[in-house]
Image: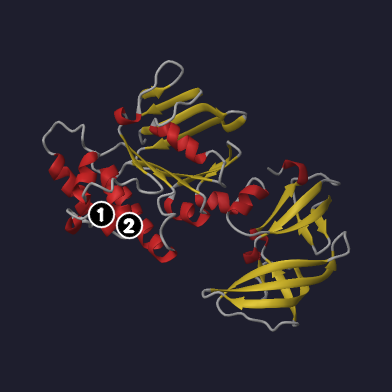
Amino acid sequence: MKRKALQMTGVWHRYGNTTALENLSIALNEGEVVCLLGPSGCGKSTALRIAAGLERAQKGIVELGDTIVSDSEVHLPAEDRNIGLVFQDYALFPHLSVIDNVKFGLKRDRSGMAESRARNALEMVHMEKFLNKYPHMLSGGEQQRVALARALAPQPEVMLLDEPYSGLDARLREKIRDEVLHLLRQQGCATLMVTHDAEEAMFMADKIIVMNEGRVIQVGSPAELYFQPVNSFVAGIFGELNKLNGLVCGNKAMTSLVDFPVQKFATGTKVEVVLRPEALCLFPLEGSDIYFEALVVESRLLGRMSYIHLSSKCRNRDGENINLHCKMPGRVLPSTGEIVRVYVEVGQTFVFEKNKNA
């Protein structure tokens, strides 16, 4: 059984009249990568700052390993916690060289090995040839590597990453996050990462914690959250959704478009049916007999997929045509004005009770 590395229990925090964290409880095991995922203002960065010791929780307990580092009586400052921290803007000192920036993270090292450990950390991130350069001489990706080396040099038990790839362009972001993940696995330290990018969280994390308005909404593996969201907020955080209003009758949710199978709702329950664009297909699907006809409004090739805007002949309760978006892998570009049959993949379709959505 893996050892507990970081645990936050019953944490509350307010800024004036705004509740930033409401009874937050999270846990990381040794070697585990956990992502806090949610929109701006949901409390994820506040949670990271409290874990780091940069802010003191107004209520709750923070533990590193078996040691309580913050509660109502104790608060260990950030510099006395065995953590590594990488900020969104990297926070490199402009007047220090690369090697001195990394050595700064080792200023409490009394072993006389700071220079050697700094060089080893830079070798891990392939920046050993840049020892005497200054931050302004480096690209964004190189600065990110130096910041990571500085955080890793003291050999922390826990790494905290605050949106570490947000300043990088898309192609470089993919390359860097792959390198960082391999490095974190190699070092074996627990990692808590903050991001608002669902794809990034799915790539990096063993476990994702979805947050909204200071509260934890759902915790699980990337696959669990993607295929078993507890509400439309969690489903929507992983991408665009098509939404339909429905009413349960027996074992079906009846909508203006088609009926969808349901099991857990009583007859008469008002529901919201959400379909990912990937749930709609212009070819027959094995095991699915749910389909409808629609008009192609527009179709666009987006490299690895085609994005198709559809308008159903069916009308909603306001008398308007139902518009839907469909994503198909490869080059599938029906002509504007064409009538197509659209099949629905039930596994990418979710039904939620209307008053239970976050």
Q: Which mark is residue 103?
A: none
Is 100 placed above or below 52 here?
below
Left or right: where does residue 285 sit relative to residue 226?
A: right
Instruction: Please tell me whether mark 2 sits on a helix, a strand or a loop.
Output: helix
Q: Please identify the residue farthest to the left as the structure is shown.
A: 112
Is tag 2's residue or tag 1's residue first in the polypeptide sequence? 1
Q: Quadrant of the N terminus?
A: top left
Image point (34%, 45%), residue name: 91
Q: Nearest the camera: 94 or 170?
A: 94
Nearer the observer: mark 2 or 1; the answer is: 1
Quadrant in the rendering for residue 309: bottom right
Instruction: Return the residue nearer the eye: 148 or 273.
Output: 148
Along the line of sight, which residue is nearer the eye, 187 or 123? 123
Callout 1 amino acid: Val
10 Å neighbourhood of mark 2: few (<14), some, or many (≥20)? few
Q: Amino acid at mark 2?
A: Glu
* Quadrant in the rendering for residue 127: bottom left
The residue indicated by pointer 1 is 125
Q: How packed is label 1: few (under 14 Cα within 10 Å), some, or many (20 or more)?
A: many
The picture places residue 114, in percent across and down from the top left corner, at 15, 39
The residue that appears at 48% across and 54% down in the rendered structure is 202
Task: Tell me: residue 309, above or below residue 241.
Answer: below
Numbered disc 1: secondary structure: loop
Residue bearing mark 2? 179
Q: Where residue 267 appears, x then y in whole percent?
A: 85, 46
Please state, as top left, top right, bottom left or bottom right, where the C terminus lies in the image.
top right
Q: Check the image and report above or below for 301 versus 66.
A: below
Q: Are marks 2 and 1 in contact (CB under 8 Å)?
A: yes
Q: Would residue 176 be found to the left or right of residue 131 on screen? A: right
Q: Quadrant of residue 17?
A: top right
Give the residue furthest to the top. 73
- Residue 290 seen anywhere in this rendered image of the structure: no
